[in-house]
Image (spheres, helix red, strand yellow):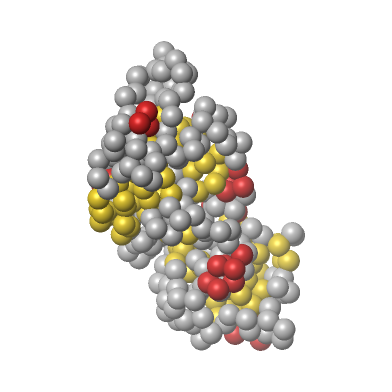
């Protein structure tokens, strides 16, 4: 996945004295007026230009005639699925996803070329839930499906950025496919549908009973990392249904403000995802759990043995012995 790694991070380092396993909840908020938790004056704010380590997005081809799919960002659209060389991948409204069924054959298939699996399907760079990929049989071979939808190329699209097939057909029935199998939207549509963006995202450090210090936002909401993601390179694997429970921690319009000197500004970065720019810590994409709203709530800890509150250094925050 291509990543936008440059972010302006305003660091307000609030000096917090944190015990390893506190017996009470510690306040997390550092005020806009420069007060740290407990009333101690915070150091002067500073502007930091930070970058997180990024993924290499080279077009390395898998061996053995496999079909390589990847997620790309092109001007004017939300993220789309392409081939390794950047050809836009489409879905057709006249097809069926449940059951997976193609209705495009003969003359149609000369204009809309089925994406064939070859000896298998490989996702390069992450961003596509591989459990949602499948195949169906057709005369040319096994056609790749995403969330049940058969996939196609448009004959006039040959390289990245070409989208001549978008909205084609009577009434508009062909659309570039997004990483969840849905229709890619224009960036204007996505912006209109998106929830209001915060002015700033905040990160600080807190201690609650039973845990070593971990990262929260200013309101005390626990922040998590996901073992199925990657830190080197920074890569998220949580999309679609996953994000209904695990909300990506998104940068605000004015970036990210750090409210604890236990978080190094250079360890904070950003990656692109459909909802906006997701905050990373030491490369790990960050999330909230939908059931956690207040300081001390850690209902997401250990879910699936994959989700853990994140420590200030990016590691898993341990439970106290």
- Which residue is drawn at the image coordinates 66% and 60% (left, top)? 148
Which of the two residues, 40 or 119, is positioned nearer the viewer here?
40
Quarter of image, res 28: top left
- Which residue is drawn at the image coordinates 43% and 25% (left, top)? 26
The tally of labels here is 0
Q: Is residue 225 visible?
A: no
Above or below: residue 230 compared with residue 296: below
- Which residue is drawn at the image coordinates 47% and 81% (left, top)? 162
For the C terminus, the image quarter is top left
Q: Position of residue 166 (x, y in %)?
A: 58, 80
For the N terminus, the image quarter is bottom left
Q: Decide if residue 17 is on the left or right side of residue 69.
A: left
Q: Position of residue 186 (x, y in %)?
A: 56, 74
Which of the two residues, 104 or 182, is positioned nearer the viewer here?
182
Above or below: residue 76 compared with residue 170: above
- Which residue is drawn at the image coordinates 43% and 29% (left, top)? 27
Q: Is residue 196 visible?
A: yes
Q: Position of residue 222 (x, y in %)?
A: 49, 35
Q: Decide if residue 100 is on the left or right side of residue 285.
A: right
Q: Position of residue 146 (x, y in %)?
A: 60, 60
């Amino acid at each position: 996945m291509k990543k936008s790694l440059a972010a302006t991070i305003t660091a307000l380092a609030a000096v917090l004295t944190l015990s390893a396993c506190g017996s009470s909840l510690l306040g997390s908020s550092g005020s806009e007026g420069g007060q740290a938790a407990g009333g101690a004056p915070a150091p002067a704010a500073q502007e930091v230009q930070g970058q997180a380590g990024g993924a290499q997005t080279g077009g390395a081809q898998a061996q053995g005639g496999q079909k390589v799919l990847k997620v790309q960002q092109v001007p004017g659209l939300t993220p789309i699925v392409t081939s390794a060389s950047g050809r836009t991948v489409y879905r057709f409204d006249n097809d069926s996803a449940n059951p997976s069924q193609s209705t495009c054959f003969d003359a149609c298939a000369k204009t809309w070329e089925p994406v064939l699996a070859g000896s298998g399907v490989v996702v390069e760079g992450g961003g596509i839930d591989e459990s949602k990929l499948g195949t169906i049989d057709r005369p040319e071979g096994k056609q790749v499906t995403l969330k049940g939808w058969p996939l196609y190329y448009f004959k006039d699209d040959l390289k990245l950025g070409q989208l001549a097939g978008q909205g084609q057909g009577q009434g508009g029935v062909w659309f570039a496919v997004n990483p969840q199998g849905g229709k890619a939207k224009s960036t204007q549509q996505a912006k209109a549908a998106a929830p209001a963006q915060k002015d700033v995202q905040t990160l600080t450090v807190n201690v609650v009973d039973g845990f070593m210090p971990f990262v929260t936002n200013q309101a005390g909401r626990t922040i998590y990392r996901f073992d199925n993601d990657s830190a080197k390179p920074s890569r998220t694997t949580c999309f679609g249904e996953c994000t209904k429970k695990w909300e990506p921690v998104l940068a605000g319009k004015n970036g990210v403000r750090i409210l604890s000197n236990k978080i190094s500004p250079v360890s904070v970065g950003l990656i692109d995802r459909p909802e906006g720019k997701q905050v990373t810590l030491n490369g790990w994409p960050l999330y909230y759990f939908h059931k956690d709203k207040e300081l001390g709530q850690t209902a997401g800890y250990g879910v699936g043995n994959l989700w853990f509150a994140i420590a200030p250094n990016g590691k898993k925050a341990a439970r106290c012995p």
